[in-house]
Image (tube, rainbow, N blue to C red):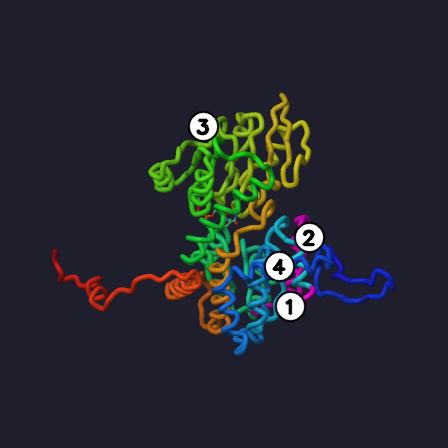
Amino acid sequence: MEIEPFVVIHPETGEVMKVMNAKIADPKLAEAGRLRIEWAESRMPVLMALKKKHQESKPLRGMRIAGCLHVTKETAVLVRALRAAGAEVSWSGCNPLSTQDDVAAALADDGVSIYAWHGMNVDEFYWCIRKTLEMKPTLTLDDGADLIFTVHKEAPQLAADILGGTEETTTGVHRLRAMAADGALRYPVIAVNDAETKWDFDNVYGTGQSSIDGILRATSVLLAGKHFVVAGYGHCGRGVAMRARGMGAQVIVTEVKPTAALKATLEGFNVMTMDEAAHIGDIFITATGMKDVIVKRHFESMKNGAIVCNTGHYDCEINLEQLAALSDRSREVRPNNREHVLAGGRSIYVLADGRLVNLAAAEGHPSEVMDMSFANQFMSMLRLAREGRDLEKKVYDIPPAQDEEIARVKLETMAIAIDRLTPEQVKYATDYSAGT
Ligand SMILES: NC(=O)c1ccc[n+]([C@@H]2O[C@H](COP(=O)([O-])OP(=O)(O)OC[C@H]3O[C@@H](n4cnc5c(N)ncnc54)[C@H](O)[C@@H]3O)[C@@H](O)[C@H]2O)c1
C-alpha cells in the first residue's frame, strides 16, 4: 500500500503551506500536543538532565534512529532529547491504538519524520514501520520488536549499517533472546526492559496505575467490592493486583508459574485457575505476554456484565475471535468499551479491543515512571553509538552502574537522601574470615 505524506493546505487560499515528512491524523492538533509534551517534560527530570548534559557535545551526531514505540507525550520527550543530542529521528507507533494524535502532530510540526495515527489497521501499522526504515537507520529503538523483525524479514541489507538496537518491553526481549540463541540476530540489542530501573518501576507501578486508569475511563465502574481477576503475577500483574486491592477490589490471581502463584498467595491474593475464576470475576485483566489466556470456555461461564481487558503487549491474550463466534451482536457502548451479547442474552464487555488498556483507553504510564525507562533508552542509544561496532550480535543487559546512576539521580530529584556504606562496612560485606 502507498499512503502519501501529509500536505498542509491553507484553508482560504488553497496554497500548499507545508509538506510534512510524516503521516499523522491532524496537523492542527500540534499546539495541544505541545502543551501535553511540556507537561511531561516538567515531570521527567532525569531525562531532561541527560538532554541538557548532551545537547552541546551532540554525541548522537550522524546517527539516524528509527523508533517504533507508543507515541505518547513521554515518548515525545525522549524524541526531543535524542534530537537535541544530534540524532536524526524517524518514528512510528508500536500499537495501532496507542498513538496520541496531538503529540504526533506536535512532533511532525517540529520536523520529526513520524508515521502514526490512532486507530490504524494492521497493514497501515507495517506501512508506517517501513516508512521509518527509508532513512536507513544506524540505530533502532523498539517496543515489542516489530521494527527489528521488519528489518530482519524485509530489509536485512539494512542490518549491516545498524550499530545496534534497544528493546523496551518484556515480550520483545523474550523474542529477541530466542533469536539470538538461534544465531538469527543480525546486530546487538540492549534489553532496556531488563534494567532494574525499568521493569521494577515502569512494569509494576506504571502498568499498575495506568491499567486501572484505562479501566476506569472506559467503564467508570466502582472497583470496591468487585471480584477483580488478574491473569499473570509477573511485574505488570503484581502492579495491577496491588492497585486494584488498594481501591477495595477482591483480587484473584491466576498463574502458570508455581513461584509466582506462591508469591501472590503469600501477598494475600486469592490464587486459582482461570476456569475457576471465570465464573466469579466481575473484571478480568490479562498481563501475561501469552496467547489464549481467556478463551471460549471462560466466556461461556462468565457472569452477565463481566468486563474483560488486557495490558500485555499483544492483543492475543483474550481470544476475541472465539468471543465473536459466541456473540449474536456487538456494539460500542462507550469509547473503548464494546458490549458482546451472547446467545442466551448475557453481555460481556471488552475494553480497547483487547489491546493494551492503559495505552488505548488512558494515556499510558505516568511521566514520572517513564522518566527512568527513557533515561535508560537514552543512555543505551549513547552506548550503541559509541560501542555498537565492537559488540556481538546478542542481547545485552543494562550495566548495573547505569541502573544505580539513574536511581541515584531520580532520588535526588525527589529530594530524598540515603545513607552510604562506610569503608568499614564495605570491607565487612566481603570479609569471609569474620565470624559471629
Ligand atoms: N501495559 C503496559 O504498558 C506494559 C508495560 C510493560 C510490559 N507490558 C507487557 O506485559 C506483559 C507482561 O510483562 P511482565 O513484565 O509482567 O512479564 P513477566 O514475565 O514478569 O510476567 C508474566 C507472568 O505471566 C505468567 N503467565 C504466563 N502465561 C500465563 C497464563 N496462561 N496464565 C496465567 N499466567 C501466565 C508468567 O508465569 C509470569 O509470571 C508482556 O507482554 C509485556 O511486554 C505491558
Mark 4 or 1 closer to N-term? 1
Mark 4 or 3 closer to N-term? 4
**Residue 379 % position (x, y):** 47, 67
Mark 4 or 2 closer to N-term? 2
Between the C-alphas of marks 4 and 2, the distance is 16 Å
Between the C-alphas of marks 4 and 1, the distance is 15 Å
Amino acid beneath label 3: Glu
Packing grade of label 1 (10 A; few <14, some 14-19, many >=20) is: some
Using the image as rendered, state which of residue 381 and residue 153 is in the foreground: 381
Mark 3 or 1 closer to N-term? 1
Q: Is residue 417 left or right of residue 120?
A: left
Pointer 3 and pointer 1: residues touching (CB < 8 Å)? no
Task: List the residue tagged with mark 3.
Answer: 276
The residue mark sitting in front, 3 or 1, is 3
How many marks are shown on the rendered structure? 4
Amino acid beneath label 1: Met
Task: List the residue tagged with mark 4.
Answer: 154
Question: Residue 124 — which label?
Answer: 2
